[in-house]
Image (tube, rainbow, N blue to C red):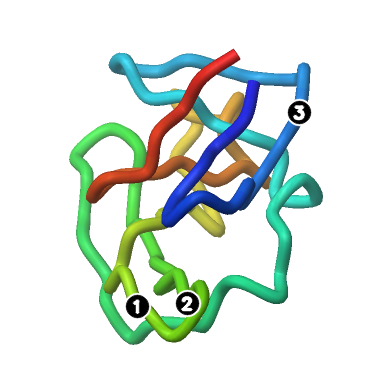
Amino acid sequence: MKAIWNGVIIAESDDIVVVEGNHYFPESALKREYVLSSNRRTMCSWKGEASYYTLFVDGDANQDAVWYYPEPKEAAQEIKGRVAFMRGVSVEE
């Protein structure tokens, strides 16, 4: 699977976990040269607190388009150390 935004592969891996229709890639598959840390945090009742990254590709920013759970709750341990994508990031084979 590949996560693509702005014509660039942001992450690529065969080790994918799908939760609630979202494809979670290993965090190690994320190409760090395209991400910047974000201060945004949200809360999920069963997964815990999510943190975000902003994508930055060819001078364009996609604010908070990558999310992850640094310390997911017990029910969501399968996504620990993984990232997922939104806001126009295409996930495809």
- Kindly identify which residue carries mark 1: 61
Q: Tag 3: Cα neighbours inside 10 Å, few (<14), some, or many (≥20)?
A: some
Determine the secondary structure under disc 3: loop
Q: Are marks 1 and 2 in contact (CB under 8 Å)?
A: yes
* Residue mark closest to the camera, 2 vs 3: 2
On the image, which quarter does residue 49 sit in? bottom left
Q: Is residue 11 left or right of residue 38?
A: right
Distance between mark 1 and mark 2 Cα atoms: 4 Å
Earlier residue among tags 1 and 3: 3
Secondary structure at badge 1 equals strand
Q: Nearer the viewer, mark 1 or mark 3?
A: 1
Q: Residue at x 52, y 82 (%)?
A: 36
Q: Residue at x 47, y 77 (%)?
A: 56
Dot 3 amino acid type: Ser
Per the model, the C-alpha gap separating discs 1 and 3 is 23 Å
Which amino acid, by three-letter code, is at mark 1?
Ala
What residue is shown with label 3? 13
- Return the residue nearer the eye: 21 or 75: 21
Spot occupied by residue 34 in the image (x, y as percentages of width and height): 60, 71
Asked if residue 90 is positioned above or below residue 41 in the image, the reply reads: above
Compare residues 7 and 77 and report the one nearer the observer: 7
* Of residues 68 and 91, the one drawn nearer to the viewer in this rendering: 91
The first of marks 1 and 2 along the sequence is 2
Amino acid marked by disc 2: Phe
- Residue 1 in percent (x, y) is at 64, 21
The C terminus - image quarter: top right
Which of the numbered marks, if any, corresponds to residue 56?
A: 2
The residue shown at (63%, 34%) is 25
Q: Secondary structure at mark 2?
A: strand
Quick one: label 2, few (<14), some, or many (20+) residues within 10 Å? Answer: some
